[in-house]
Image: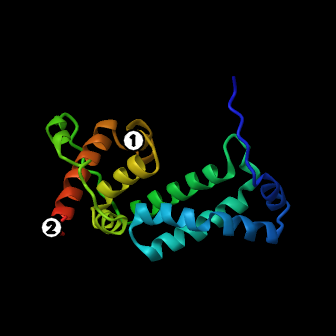
Amino acid sequence: MEAVYIDKHLHLVEECRKANRKAQFEIYKLYAKAMYNVALRILAQEAEAEDVLQEAFLDAFTRIDSFRGETTFGLWLKQIVINKSINQLRKRKAEFISIDGIDVAAEETVPFDDLEMKVNEIRDAVSKLPDGYRVVLTLYLFEGYDHEEIAHILKISENTSRSQYMRAKVKLNSLLAKRGA
């Protein structure tokens, strides 16, 4: 049985296909804040997130004919934002440390679930993580990707994705502990 996606904004998408500026502005208003937050979680720099947001919308409106409705417009746009954010990181020459062959099971015992922090403090700590750690942690925890998908998106191995995630948790715990949490 094929999944059916109901996109309540499909009428706006159809108007955007006709280059209707008002519909484009409505789509922008509907999705801009959420897409900015996606970019900001990955990039941790407001100016870059704003640039990526603008580029993503421009790209989406330019390529709207390639939107086939297999998912909602929001998911399609989110993928554009994620890809543009990762490309921006690559421009910064983000390094993803490969530790293929190293057992990371010992790090899995870090008490990460016991954190009772305010969202802003955690967000601030996440933004201070090195790019590689922050991106993998963001894609895994906040965007819901699994390690196989992250490996494909970032062009790294699954083991590297897992190790970056584990190291990100350890580093995040360390940053939060320094704050007295």
- What residue is pinned by disc 1? 151
Where 161 sits versus 172, above or below? above
Pointer 1 local density, CA inside 10 Å: few below 14, some 14–19, many at least 20: some
Residue 134 in which image quadrant: bottom left
- Out of 76 and 87, give the one closest to the viewer: 76
Left or right of 60 on screen, residue 137: left
Q: Circles 1 and 2: CB distance less than 8 Å?
A: no
Rendered image: mark on residue 25 = none
Residue drawn at 81 percent across, 71 percent down: 22
Mark 1 / mark 2, whichever is N-terminal:
1
Q: Amino acid at mark 2?
A: Lys
- Out of 153 and 176, give the one closest to the viewer: 176
Pointer 2 local density, CA inside 10 Å: few below 14, some 14–19, many at least 20: few
Left or right of 166 on screen, residue 90: right
Residue 173 x, y percent position in the rendering:
20, 56
Left or right of 28 on screen, residue 119: left
Where 35 sits versus 158, above or below? below
Q: State the quadrant of the C terminus.
A: bottom left
User: Element at badge 2?
Assistant: helix
- Out of 157 and 43, give the one closest to the viewer: 43
Residue 115 in which image quadrant: bottom left
Report the number of numbered marks.
2
Q: State the quadrant of the N terminus.
A: top right
Residue 156 x, y percent position in the rendering:
35, 43
Rendered image: mark on residue 178 = 2
